[in-house]
Image (cartoon, grey):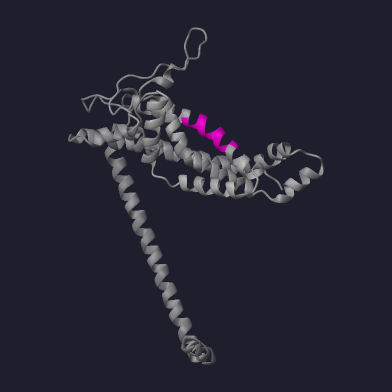
Amino acid sequence: MRSQRTILNNLRNPIAIAASIRERKRWEQFFIVLGWFSLLVALLTLVFLVGDLFLRGLPMLNWKFFTSPPSSDPEEAGILTAWVGSLLVILVTAFVAIPLGIAAGIYLEEYAPKNWLLDFIEVNITNLAGVPSIIYGLLALGFFVYILNWGESILTAGFTLALLILPVVIVTTRESLRAIPQGIREAAYAVGSSRWQVIADHVLPYSMGGILTGIIVGISRAIGETAPLITIGALTFITFLPDPPIQSEFPYISFKWIWSPFTVLPIQMFNWVSRPQEAFQVNAAAAGIVLLVLTLAVNATAIYLRYRFRKSIKW
């Protein structure tokens, strides 16, 4: 009651109101300055770290570095097996996670009945998106490696990272579908379209920009993951490439490579960073530049695709 009387008395007093406004503006200015200072510190830290990475690793980036396998000699070591392994693992991850995640998102948003079971599934999918990646590694170790006997292979790594990014793909798919105005669905139903025709011809094309953004963001996360791959037995030192997927003899396509042992760029960097020689630290910086450029390229692709899809939509 006293606080309410105080507020009413202040409202009747123009001088108190003016003083209160000045105090609020001072606090506003303080938080603006604090926000800009925090942003400046973060940007300077990022620029310093990236600049140091480029200064140390840029001289090592040459054709030999990309085409040479790892070696005990830092002058001869390269990232051939690492970047090939990363591309193959991400290929399997995308092949598994993209169609499964989009299909699950479409079913949950457009077909599933709205009941307690759907609410339960939504809560669990949202929670899975925040589970630490090492948990997925332990799950893959017990299920893919020991139960299914897939071993420490590219297939195991691809499915592990697919499980990791699957909640992200499902959530972004549902949010993109939900953002489409209901009037578009009703107009399509009004001219006799079936539910699948509405989804395939109208809802899905209009939401593809957001869906692709979520997919690429998930793949960007998968590119830099290390913990789950180490858990399932990824090698830190490997000098040979997997079997080529294309052969000169019939049937010309081989899938033996999915059973091959592998390494990826983050694990190769971890291996070099853990060594005491300074030359290996330089190699790790060069590999970090490649990983950073690869991640930025994937995100730039997402932005471009989103722009193209949104530009083509005319409501």
Q: Residue furthest front?
A: 116
**275 shown above or below 116:** above
Residue 250 visible somewhere in the drawing:
yes
Q: Which residues are magenta?
A: 93-103
> Based on the displayed image, in which of its 4 quarters is residue 158 positioned?
top left
> Based on the displayed image, in which of its 4 quarters is residue 111 positioned?
top right
**249 shown above or below 197:** above
Name the chief secondary structure element in magenta.
helix
Nearer to us in this view, 288 or 192: 192
- Total marks drawn? 0
**268 shown above or below 315:** above
Does residue 3 show up magenta in the picture? no
Q: Position of residue 5 (x, y in %)?
A: 50, 90
Q: Is residue 302 left or right of residue 115?
A: left
Q: Position of residue 286 (x, y in %)?
A: 31, 35
Residue found at x 19% / y 36%: 278
Q: Is residue 144 left or right of residue 49?
A: right
Q: Residue furthest left?
A: 276
Q: Residue furthest top?
A: 249
Nearer to us in this view, 226 or 303: 226
Residue 299 visible somewhere in the drawing:
no
Q: Position of residue 70 (x, y in %)?
A: 28, 25
Q: Position of residue 8 (x, y in %)?
A: 53, 89
> Based on the displayed image, in which of its 4 quarters is residue 292 positioned?
top left
Residue found at x 33% / y 54%: 44
